[in-house]
Image (cartoon, helix red, strand yellow):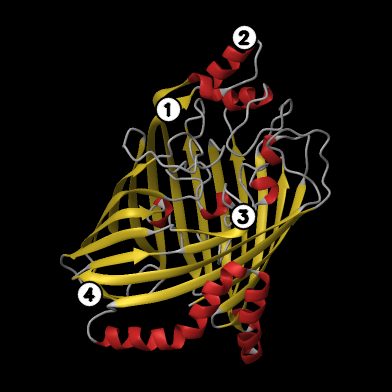
Amino acid sequence: MAAVLNEFLPGWIGRHHPGALLMAGALALSPALAAVAATSAETGGEAFAVHGQFTYVEQNTDSFSAPYAGANSLSPSQGRETTDATLYLGARLWSGAELWLTPELDQGFGLDDTLGLAAFSSGEAYKVGKHAPYLRLPHAFVRQTIDESGEVEAVAPDLTQLGGSHSADRWVVTLGKFAVTDIFDANQYAHDQRNDFLNWAAIDAGSFDYAADAWGFTVGAAVEWYRGSWTLRAGVFDLSNVPNSPHLDPGGHEFQLDAEIEKRYAVRDQAGRLLLTMFDTRGRMGLLDEAVQLAAATGGPVDIAAVRRYRSRLGASLDLEQALAADVGLFARVGKAAGNVEAYEFTDIDRAVSAGLSIKGSAWHRPEDTVGVVALVDGISAERERYLNAGGLGILVGDGKLPHPGSERIAETYYRLAVFSQAQLSLDYQWVKNPAYNTDRGPVSIFAVRVHAQF
């Protein structure tokens, strides 16, 4: 079976998704590249590495109830697909220093051009979509690790990590272009839309309005200090030039400060981790009530851009991951962000709660398979409810009115089948009550198929 798929998959990818030719060629070369990397590892760590990934996601909605719709509404009975293929190119510059570049080809659209849900249904769907594959560079960064004392730990090769070793106590400095969530709010059970959950508010705290362009990446610097069972992190990052823009503000006039405290522990020999993540967004943002009042006074539409002034938006979240057994993990997040000001980058969520389980398939003799389930509850402030009811548009939501608001509630489950060592097929289902906080619409069923390969 594996031999047949190895022969069939690259051809299918090339015929149906031209952008994935990058991945197909890299897969063909992977045995030779792995041999070179292994030789380097024998001499004290990888000198360079080449990895790759390909992901295809198709999502469909059912024919849910939708008595009215606005500019940012989710539509019944639709289907959309996204495809991306990435090369991860890493090189060791000097002792402890790594350079990473990740050229990527993207194609496709999210449901309704990634609109209609605050907790959007696919982390593979960006706010920019195109019919033809297009090239971009999500990562271009240098990471410097400075070892201190403590036990020497092995470092396994990963997509943006050279194999080698480091000390338990260390400093890590990352500088360049990358995602804030590459470093902050990480969770081994729910943080990777290519391998686990798809929903935005499952893979990150829904209220974490992290600095990013429309694809989710930014330019900045982060510092991490590992000491015993604790880690402290801090970073400063460019915001986009206006909220939800494809373009970053390179002058540092609009930026975000992030900080995180991590505590690692064990309960009955099962590892656990707790993160407290905080952000302070400083940029030109509008107060929601001011936009509503201006529209009422002038008789015009609600326009948040007309009331933007330089101000801050604060937020914080807690992130828990806890192994319950060798093949079972529990995770949970709770977050809160200021609800009187417009969201800047991520999505329209002021309060977020999520909890779920990740289970490996050892019990049914499929140890490489994974099943996951998560429940999400996301809410907004009274100010944001008034803004949406007056016809205002958020980053992702806006049905034209919101006479009967309610929290957005989502259940997601997936089964990831390990087809062979380098490829997985996942089936995903999401049930959404009160899409875009609107009790007049839905509930919505969203079905998805995901094909993912990486080396």
Q: Is residue 66 left or right of residue 325?
A: right
Residue 309 visible (yes or no):
yes
Q: Please, what secondary structure does the residue beneath circle 4 have?
A: strand
Q: Which residue is mark 3?
A: 122
| 282, above or below 195, in the image | above
Residue under pointer 1: 284
Asked if residue 163 shows in the view, the reply is no
Name above or below for residue 404 compared with residue 319. Answer: above
Instruction: Rate crowding at label 2 as few (under 14), some (14 to 19) or many (20 or more) other CA atoms within 10 Å.
Output: few
Give the residue pinned by disc 2.
Answer: 298
Mark nearer the viewer, 3 or 2: 2
Q: Residue furthest top?
A: 297
The answer to the question of whether label 2 and label 4 lie on touching residues, with beta carbons closer than 8 A, is no
Element class at badge 1? strand
Task: For mark 3, give the secondary structure.
Answer: loop
N-term mark: 3 or 2? 3
Where residue 3 appears, as percent x and y from the top left, is 62, 91
The picture places residue 179, in percent across and down from the top left corner, at: 41, 53
Q: Are marks 3 and 2 in contact (CB under 8 Å)?
A: no
Residue that appears at 68% across and 34% down: 406
Please tell me the numbered disc located at residue 152. Answer: 4
Count of numbered marks: 4
Give the residue type at disc 4. Answer: Val
Query: Residue 207's x, y, as percent?
Result: 50, 41
